[in-house]
Amino acid sequence: MLLENKVVLITGASRGIGRATAIEAARQGADVAINTFRDDAVAAEVVAEIEALGRKAVVFDADVAQPDSATGFVQAAVDALGRVDVFVSNAGICPFHAFLDMPVETLRRTMEVNLHGAYFMVQAAANQMVKQGDGGSIVAISSISALVGGEMQTHYTPTKAGVHSLMQSCAVALGRHGIRCNSVLPGTIATDINKDDLADPAKREYMEGRIPLGRLGRPEDIASVVAFLASDMASYMSGAAVLVDGGAFANFQ
């Protein structure tokens, strides 16, 4: 019960890593507020799973790219659950596209959701934690793509590098308030964000072959690491980046 009686907020929590993290937080004893966007039926399923674990859950539907969504989400969580102990910035998109003819709107939307949205949400959560006066933990989901390039991801990889950098700077800015800030860098995780890319059996086999552990990651593989970083077991970790990729980054040879 790493997060017993804590309140955990998670963006992009209806599917994939966000959903797994919400359920893991409840399993570890937390009440959970989830942010989703136009995904009511699936959000209801997440709430049901959290409540089945004996914990409270609240849903806030909003587009993280809109700055006022951040203050709205945090306030809704405080109204329903009383406070904010842990904030997980997870919401992200990756519409694969070539570089030379990248549509302006695709670039802009990716930046606004992945990086600007993370900034606004983390800022709102941090302000609530400072107001409470007893610290907290912020975990942002970056990506192995913060460290390596991708031919069809020239709009995406800079946002994930930015999320990692944001956590480093926030660790410095918020340390005096007892707020720890860390990032998690998943490798190739089988989620909705890449299901079309991995639908090609040859591509999937190639990706699995590059991973020393021999398989793609599962959302639960990331959720457990987030729970650790959010917990008091990681009380002296701040500004860190944890790579969770089955050994893929190390496999250059």
Image (cartoon, helix red, strand yellow):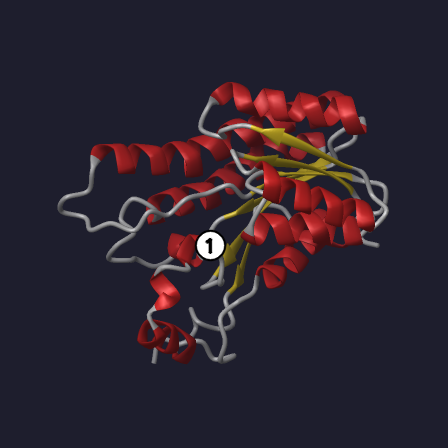
Regarding residue 224, the answer to whether it shows in the image is yes
Place residue 219 in its image quadrant: bottom right
Q: Quadrant of residue 223?
A: bottom right
Query: Visible in this render: residue 183?
Result: no
Q: Quadrant of the N terminus?
A: bottom right
> Which quadrant of the structure image shows residue 180?
top right
Residue 245 placement (x, y as % from top left): 50, 66
* Few, some or many residues within 10 Å of mark 1 (<14, 14–19, 20+): few
Secondary element type, mark 1: helix
In the displayed image of the protein, which residue is found farthest to the left? 100
> Is 38 rendered above or below residue 69?
below
Q: Amino acid at mark 1?
A: Asp
The residue carrying mark 1 is 192
- Closer to the camera, 50 or 90? 50
As rendered, which of 88 and 106 lies closer to the eye?
A: 106
Give the image location of residue 201, x and y in percent. 35, 75
Screen quadrant of the C terminus: bottom left
Could you tell whether 56 is left or right of 105 in the image? right
In front: 223, or 37?
A: 37
- How many marks are shown on the rendered structure? 1
Which residue lies at the image location 50% right of the left edge and 56% below the top edge? Answer: 185
In the rendered image, the vertical position of residue 238 relative to residue 194, given as above or below: above
Going 42% across and 76% down the picture, which residue do you hit?
A: 208
The residue located at (33%, 47%) in the rendering is 95
Judge whether 99 appears above or below 197 on screen.
Answer: above
Q: Position of residue 81 (x, y in %)?
A: 79, 29
